[in-house]
Amino acid sequence: MSATGKRLVAAVLALGAGGLALSACSEGSSRKATEPPAVAAPLFAPPSSGTQGTKAAAPVFTRITVRAQGDTTELAREPDGTWRIVAPVKARAEAAAVEALLETLGSTASSPLVKDAPTDADLEKYGLKSPVFSVTAHAFLPDASGGGEDVPSRQHTVTLHGGVENMFDGSVYVRRDGDAKVYAAQGSVRWSLDKDTFALRSKELLGDLEANELTLIEVRAKERGYVLEHEAGTTKWRLTKPLPERADEARVTSLLKNLKEHRALSFPTDSPQTRKKWGLESPLIDARFTPRSGEPVRIRLAQVMEDGAPRVHALREQGSDAVLGEVPESALAALDVDVLELKDKHVLNFRREDVRRVVFHPGNGVAPITLVNTAGTDGGSESWQVESPRQGKAQHFRVVSLLRVLGTLKASSFGEARPKNWAKYGIGDASRGAVLLGAEGRELARLWLGGDVPDESGLSYARGSGPEVMEVSVEGLALPMRAEDLMEGTPAPAPTEARGP
């Protein structure tokens, strides 16, 4: 059960400070200074246990009905402690709104009295003849084992009515069924309880999609589209359309997060005519999200102009459930993204544990520097040796640091794909770079560093595991220029010296 659910279960439905605590009102000023105000019993008062000093069990709320602003909204508590709207629509409840409502109702303090025996004229004046809002709370008092939900004697219901605001101090007049008295609750009570269906309904029309729970994302837009597949048993994603590429895991996660943040502005009544009116039969974006289990989620987004202003609507479908809502115009950009944004920006794609040999190329005709991991293939600790052009023990921390930098090196941007002439970027057989080899000499990854990017300080052209030209920052990439740079007993090279010409 969630922490919120536990708090709700532990709450005692009552008039109280911070919730239904009653504040002084203008009528109080007419009382004599020495006259103590009457005190009301808690709104939700569990039956006495009959044993002095025994604390009554906290009620467990199961259903709430809110009549406010022309709506009657029924909410029900799920077994896991979450709340759903069951009427007039079936939808998830807005967690923050329901929590505020129940925390208000769950206050334990008692309240001072405004009117002991109000007349009809009094009730009319207080706005309680026809209440501005009413909240009915159903709960049961659990037994020692936490049960009792189906025991009639343990079930209790209380209804609170709210009236108008007292202009003297901002309080609101309230009364409850079974109690003729009128009280004056803090103004915050009205903010918590006077809610229509839209206010109590979750606005996360597009969200509730988690990257680790999906296997496939397919997006079709007017000008472009893409398909992302989740590699089974990993956190990795791959672009399969328009071209097979590694995908940026963080970008996929942020795409879904951004989608969730575009909350519904309204929920129009769904019908074939409405869908046609809002352009959802030929949407700008048509996306499908396939989870590991359960029905796929389809989201369509369309835009029309109304009174010179753009309006964007979304239709979310999952199985037989369909929800139509208006969303901010910015929701279109959450899915309609350039495929380059989704590509993995790592320059090299390799697993460090697979690397058995590294060859650094200083460039300009300088002999390559070869290192070998002399540890066994049984998962033992790395032990690096310089093999050529000189032989000797390598500085372990420096080799590990270089592999870490190579593994985390990312492109600032992508350039030409599959260029016919790499030389125009300063990339060729004589370029500086590194080759990572695995068991039996299999090449795992190769880095070529080319010329400087014009007008971009600190950026160089590069070629890595992908087919395109990349622009990368070479700051901190201290590739060795000679074997001594990696051997024990020699000082670390300066960054400018390591980079070379």
Image (tube, rainbow, N blue to C red):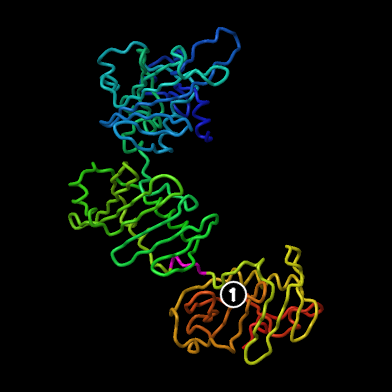
Q: Residues within 10 Å of mark 1 (few under 14, many from 20)?
A: many
The amino acid beneath tag 1 is Ala
Whether residue 467 is visible: yes
Whether residue 34 is visible: no
Residue positioned 47% across, 53% down in the render: 211
Vertical arrangement, residue 255 with respect to residue 429, above or below:
above
Residue underneath mark 1: 445
Q: Is residue 26 left or right of residue 109?
A: left
Vertical arrangement, residue 233 with respect to residue 407, above or below:
above
Name of the residue lying farthest toward the right: 489
Q: Quadrant of residue 62?
A: top left
Q: Quadrant of residue 496?
A: bottom right
Part of the protein shown in magenta = 341-345
Residue 337 among magenta residues: no
Residue 85, percent from left and from top? 36, 33
Along the viewing direction, whichever of 98 and 380 lies nearer the viewer: 380
* SS type, badge 1: strand
Residue 220, percent from left and from top? 32, 61
The quarter of the image holding the C terminus is bottom right
Residue 344 among magenta residues: yes
SS assignment for the magenta stretch, majority: loop
